[in-house]
Image (spheres, helix red, strand yellow):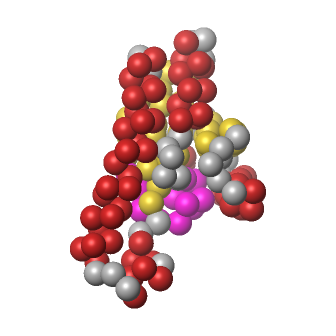
Amino acid sequence: MLRLLIPVIHHEGALQAARHAAFLHAERCVSEVEIVEVVEPLEWGRAAAFHSRGALALFEKRALFSPMMNTRAILDDAGVPYRWSRAFGPVAETIATHAALQQADAVIVDASQLSFLTRWWIIARLWRLTKAPVTMLH
């Protein structure tokens, strides 16, 4: 039985990855799913020059609530056991760290909402940084 790691890296969530995990769970291939919400802090970017830290924190909280709830709802409906957490840091490095810490057997990245260059940048970094196989859904 596999342990899957599903990173949520886009404001639309990881819906395709959650559907894929639900299918694999129905086929009795998956025992555990870990959802990690990867957030690059807004204060690292240019927004910190124009907005207060409190306003940026409120924006992050509102922007991230819905994608995680949608992803979790798919897994809840399918009866898939899962855990979820939030991690702050660079996307690829944070995913690789979580995969190593959770001893994930596979990483499933939902890239359906990412641009072509972002998609390939993330997958290239993940292939170098993680030992677990990385599957990108698009």
| Image-based side of 112 in relation to 8, left or right | right
Residue at the extreme bottom: 49
Q: Which of 133 and 86 is in front in this view?
A: 86
- Where residue 31 appears, x then y in whole percent? 50, 21
- Where residue 91 appears, x then y in whole percent? 55, 60
Q: Which residue is drawn at 53% across and 31% down?
A: 18
Residue 96 falls within the magenta-colored stretch: yes
Which quarter of the figure is the N terminus placed in? top right
| Image-based side of 30 in relation to 127, left or right | left
Q: Which residue is drawn at 75% across and 56% down?
A: 116
Residue at the extreme top: 27
Secondary structure mainly formed by the magenta segment: helix
- Where residue 94 appears, x then y in whole percent? 51, 58
Residue 72 falls within the magenta-colored stretch: no
Residue 47, located in which quarter of the rendered image? bottom left
Q: Residue at x 61, y 42 (%)?
A: 110
Q: Nearer the viewer, residue 80 or 70?
A: 70
Residue 125 visible to the viewer:
no
Q: Residues in magenta?
A: 86-98
Q: What count of labels does the image hold?
A: 0
Which quarter of the figure is the C terminus placed in? top right
Residue 118 vertical position relative to residue 56 in the rendered view, above or below: above
Q: Residue at x 54, y 17 (%)?
A: 25
- Where residue 61 appears, x then y in whole percent? 31, 57
Q: Nearer the viewer, residue 59 or 87?
A: 59
